[in-house]
Image (cartoon, coloured by chain):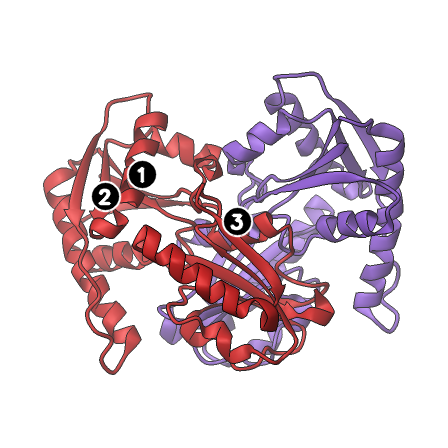
Chain colours: A red, B purple
Amino acid sequence: MKTVLVIGIGAGNPDHLTLQALKALNRVDVFFLFDKGPAKHGLNDLRRDLCTRLATERPWRLVQADNPERGPDGDSYTGAVAQLNEDKQQVLERLMDQHLADGECAGILVWGDPSLYDSTLRILQAILASGRQVFEYQVIPGISAVQALAASHKVTLNDIGGSVRISPGRQLPTQLAPGESQVVMLDAHQAFERLRGQGLFIWWGAYVGSVDEVLIAGPLDEVADEIIRVREQARMRHGWIMDTYLLRPISRR
Amino acid sequence: MKTVLVIGIGAGNPDHLTLQALKALNRVDVFFLFDKGPAKHGLNDLRRDLCTRLATERPWRLVQADNPERGPDGDSYTGAVAQLNEDKQQVLERLMDQHLADGECAGILVWGDPSLYDSTLRILQAILASGRQVFEYQVIPGISAVQALAASHKVTLNDIGGSVRISPGRQLPTQLAPGESQVVMLDAHQAFERLRGQGLFIWWGAYVGSVDEVLIAGPLDEVADEIIRVREQARMRHGWIMDTYLLRPISRR
């Protein structure tokens, strides 16, 4: 039997790693890394450093594969992601076929938490369903960017008795539901702009938890322009940006 | 200056502790524990074990205080919680006044993540606002029961491009919004019952991450009665229950 460990490694701070993740790293025979292009080489360097520094109890090897890119959304974002996941599935199947022997253990390092806006679990389940690979797998939770954002801003995600909605930018409603706090991840288009003028407070952060962390908090109407400016500068400097934010009425701050 | 570290310790598995939390434990001079009555002594025993086992780099002491209980909800759950938090604030102020010297560091261990359905941050901010104690504080994120649930069930919280709503039981809507996954924490009344007959799938767990973990997954209409039965048995056996669940249409399972 082959084993795959899906290991949440937190949101950019190597100290976000849990003891459970540390133990998992030290069970791995082969780490699978996916190359997402030159702009994100830094992220894979961090993964490699993590393995070198923390997986010290036994020998391991590292296999890197090109990560398929998402095609144009066309009529359907979901469709584009589903196609991307099929492409990723082929890559991972090939890795498991060629680089993971029976009785061995593979490790896939996931930024944040594998349960939130990550496709690794869906892809593994599709491989299992295809019957083309037989393996068992385990999921090790990690600190998500949402939690790192809240911790850095020292703010709770919910207010008393309230709900929290976590959405990708394109699902951000034009108004928050009463009693609800709204978290946005994966927002390529600064969707918060459409909520100006509603008395909201925003806690915004990019690269949260990492040494490059940038934080801005304030009434949305007052800080939106600053966030847009800082966000663009950071995106230019790093070649990519990962930002997250929390919105709630100022009255329930 | 006094320092308070609010340390997320994860959802019941001692290995959920992050390296950041481990370092924080080893900065603490005094741990503040809150006694929530005999039924929950086991939880404080776990906290105490954690300190003894992991805070080994320097001497520390432990101060325990009775935790105020929430009064009847009366007209307002939020009001009852706000009153409870005022009571807790008094207790914590007294601890900081009598048991934390200038230059010292206090540690408060929070189950799960301090940003999700926990009042410690709100209470510290109220103390700071009162001006009766001067201190700095830091938040160390932890693995929440939501993440432990998802990891144990090997399921993602969102589906592709979708949103996730995290609510206390009393905020569970009678219907899920399209494209939304629903997580429920703090549900004393099995609110999922009111969503029977809607083609939903449920991933349910109690004491997730701990050695007492119980998991049930299936179509809600088929497993609801089993969950109610297992939940009641577990509550009787442990004297308390902490359960969490995820709901999503079977079609988007």
Residue that carries the numbered disc 2 in the rendered image: A33
Q: Residue at x 24, y 72 (%)?
A: A80
**Local secondary structure at mark 3:** helix
Residue nearer the viewer, B101 or A97: B101
Letter of the chain that mark 1 sits on in the rendering = A
For the N terminus of chain A, the quadrant is: top left
Q: Residue at x 39, y 55 (%)?
A: A234
Disc 3 versus disc 2: distance between alpha carbons? 24 Å
Where on the picture, by quarter, is residue A136? top left
**Local secondary structure at mark 2:** strand
Does residue A50 sit above or below B120 in this rendering? above
* Contact? badges 1 and 2 (CB < 8 Å): yes
Does residue A128 sit above or below B135 in this rendering? below
Residue that carries the numbered disc 1 in the rendered image: A47
Q: Residue at x 49, y 81 (%)?
A: B198
Whole-percent x, y for residue A171 in the image: 44, 75
Whole-percent x, y for residue A242 in the image: 39, 56
Decide: few, some or many residues near mark 2? Use Cα within 10 Å; few <14, some 14-19, many ≥20: many
For the C terminus of chain A, the quadrant is: bottom right
Does residue B176 sit above or below A235 in this rendering? below
Q: Earlier in the sequence, mark 1 or mark 3?
A: 1
Disc 1 versus disc 2: distance between alpha carbons? 8 Å
In the picture, the disc for residue A148 is 3
Letter of the chain that mark 3 sits on in the rendering = A
Q: Amino acid at mark 1?
A: Arg
Q: Amino acid at mark 3?
A: Ala
Residue nearer the viewer, A203 or A74: A203
Q: Earlier in the sequence, mark 1 or mark 2?
A: 2
Q: In this rendering, do the residues under marks 1 and 2 share a single chain?
A: yes
Note whether residue B70 is visible: no
* Contact? badges 1 and 3 (CB < 8 Å): no
